[in-house]
Image: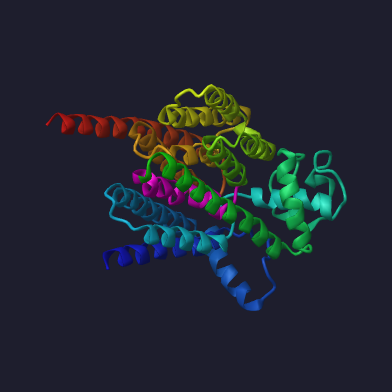
Amino acid sequence: MKLKILFGSYLLVIIGLFFYSFTQVDLGLTLTEWSIWQVYQKFFQYIGYFQRPLSASLYAGLLVMLSVFYILYLYLAQKNALTYKHIFGVILSTSIILLFSYNAFSHDLFNYIFDAKIVTFYNQNPYEHKALDYAGDPMLGFMHWTHRTYPYGPIWLLATVPLSFLGFGFLLPTIMLFKALIFASYIGLVYAIKKILQKVSVKQMHMGMLFFALNPLVLIEGLVSAHNDIFMLVFALWAFYALMQKRHLVTFLLLGISIGVKFATIFLLPIFIFILFMQKRNKKISWDLIFITLVIAMIVPIFAASIRTSYQPWYLLYVLPFAAIVPTRYFITIPVIVISIFSVFEYLPFLYLGNWDPPVPTILLWIREVSIVCAVIFTALFLAKSHFARKR
């Protein structure tokens, strides 16, 4: 009964996030001409754009509740107090609800759609043409980053062009198709985490699955905003699972697909080659050390991307699936949890003020600095407590 109450309470928060996402529908965007929907859309937009203190308070409240439930679920998983059926139910229900949410915190989804539209509608090459080249297109009225050409790998284009065809030029069905692709990638990632942990540590399986699946940053940047990093990462994690099974051709095919989406996972290649080398010589592999190295390797593209442009919260998606396969290595998981939760609070100043102008950059810097300090303090306290507990 207590688990049912927990499940129901958590889903209420997820439903709250689903509804809140529509407060951020661009004022120039009409999702559907359906008259009843127009009434609801304007109601939500009024909160998001004209009642900003209320909007920011709602968002902060949702984040606090998501974080509390997340930590509670991890605690229960660590205590083996959850059944697989419950975990499967909460992950599937969460992902289905947020599949239908609006991409509230990023306009990247519209860029993905327009990039594919350049191929399917304008019959042009998005590597050579940008959105601004089609000034009469109505999508430009609510898009950002219209001045850039295609920044991703060819695999992402191959994956999205068919979705653009299937959308038949209608925006809402196309949005849903793109979000369905991210939904499938999210489920695929959770299942990959399960399979990897089944192979090395069944006891950590539930915790690892929940560590990734219910992380507030994954929910917001993955399922709500639908960043394509999720699609890139699902191939990388399945590539690693194939490598553990010594299926080398499949391994490098999947890793190549992952790199061909967004390039960041190329930093995994040296580790994969090292594992292949060890396997060919029948050497013993310390998988625990390999898992930690994978986490460190995926921190590198976060710094590279941040230096090239600026840090964005969804860059932490690079690390989270790999941290999930070492869920009890608390010197990794505690900093990842703390920094990822703080990162989704970075949208709060924008939601309150409606822009990214000063003093927002200073506030964001404070949030990042405080997150690092808190991560160090919480990790040190936890490790110290564990050390003294072992001495008793």
256 or 359, nearer to the observer: 256
Q: Residue furthest left?
A: 392
331 or 219, nearer to the observer: 331
**Image location (x, y in percent) of residue 343:** 46, 41
**Image location (x, y in percent) of residue 57:** 42, 56
Q: Residue furthest right?
A: 123
- If the image is split into quadrants, where does the C terminus sit? top left
Q: Is residue 255 left or right of residue 195?
A: right
Vertical placement of residue 131 versus 255, above or below: below
Q: Residue furthest bottom?
A: 36
Q: Is residue 352 visible?
A: no
Q: Residue at x 58, y 51 (%)?
A: 185
Residue 211 magenta: yes
Range covered by the magenta-colored residues: 203-227
Q: Residue at x 59, y 68 (%)?
A: 41
Q: Is residue 119 left or right of residue 304?
A: right
Q: Is residue 379 visible?
A: yes
Vertical placement of residue 5 versus 231, above or below: below
Q: Residue at x 44, y 37 (%)?
A: 323
Q: Main secondary structure of the magenta part?
A: helix
Q: Is residue 340 left or right of residue 317?
A: left
Vertical placement of residue 139 versus 276, above or below: below
**Image location (x, y in percent) of residue 29:** 68, 61
Task: Quadrant for residue 162, please give it.
Answer: bottom right
Q: Residue at x 52, y 28 (%)?
A: 297
- If the image is split into quadrants, where does the N terminus sit? bottom left
Residue 91 magenta: no
Vertical placement of residue 327 versus 376, above or below: below
